[in-house]
Image: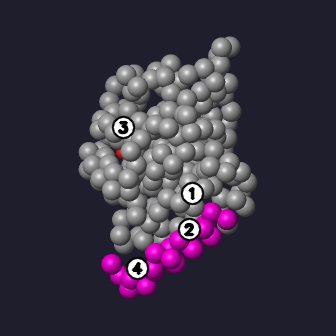
Amino acid sequence: MNEKNNSLSEEELTEIRLEMVERQIVRRNVKDKAVLEAMRKVPRHLFVPQHYLPSAYDDGPLPIGYEQTISQPYVVASMTEELQLTPQSRVLEIGTGCGYQTAVLAEIAREVCTIEIIPQLADSARKLLENLGYGNLHFQTGDGSQGWPDKAPFDGIIVTAAAPRIPEILVTQLKFSGRMVIPVERGYYGSQDLLLLVKDIDGVKETNLYPVRFVPLQNKE
Ligand code: SAH
């Protein structure tokens, strides 16, 4: 730990977190009360590598090792809001990473199933989330691009790595009126759109939310 870390008490970190929620999330129009409450509660600083602790509440993504990143707080909040979760919801997350988004989902939903392809990240996220006392999580280490058929169907699916196209298999694992948020590569290299898919009897409605930059979804197909 460096000097700056040592100088931040838990109270100060809480204050910084509450300020982050006001400035980065409320001001950008995230309104879902459960999402705001979760963002105020989950200690993001515990999910970032120690030397990034002073930047834990900054308005951007941060490296978490293995060439992966923890998403920007606003993106975590807004993707979660788009899922319209309730305390009854069951959610699938693809790309556990450091587990921060997982914790936000676990605060709101009944059950969260999360898959991570990099074993070291999967292990450390699991340990941290268990230490924090989340009892409504199911973990899987491996390729999540085929979803989790045994646990389907889900009310919500969140993919936190960019796919080359919408994986149809994931759509089949959504309930009717279920919602999926997923970054999808569009056109030239590096350009991605965050898509919202809503499944109903008539098919799947697709909404383009905003441009994003996620690490690629690894696909072992
Ligand atoms: N929600 C995470 C984001 C991590 S970045 C967080 O806030 O920390 C995306 C994650 O997706 C990385 O950890 C990466 O290893 C993982 N990933 C990439 N392709 C995957 C796949 N096919 N199956 C499961 N996880 C995958």
Q: Do we see residue 67 in this rendering?
A: no
**Viewer-side residue, 204 vs 18:** 18
- Beta carbon at label 1 within 8 Å of ligand 1: no
Quarter of image, ligand 1: top left
How far apart are the alpha carbons under marks 3 and 2? 27 Å
How far apart are the alpha carbons under marks 1 and 2? 8 Å
How far apart are the alpha carbons under marks 4 and 2? 15 Å
Kindly identify which residue carries mark 4. Answer: 5
Kindly identify which residue carries mark 1. Answer: 39
| Residue 207: quarter of image | top right
Q: Residue at x 55, y 45 (%)?
A: 108
Which circle, 4 or 1, is nearer the viewer? 1
Magenta stretch: dominant secondary structure: helix
User: Quick check: 189 left or right of 2?
Assistant: right
Q: Residue at x 48, y 45 (%)?
A: 106
Residue type beneath disc 3: His
How far apart are the alpha carbons under marks 3 and 4? 32 Å
**Viewer-side residue, 102 vs 11:** 11
**Viewer-side residue, 87 vs 23:** 87
Kindly identify which residue carries mark 2. Answer: 17
Image quarter (top left, top right, bottom left or bottom right) of the C terminus = top left
In the image as oriented, which residue stretches furthest toward the top? 202
The segment highlighted magenta reads: 1-22
Kindly identify which residue carries mark 3. Answer: 138
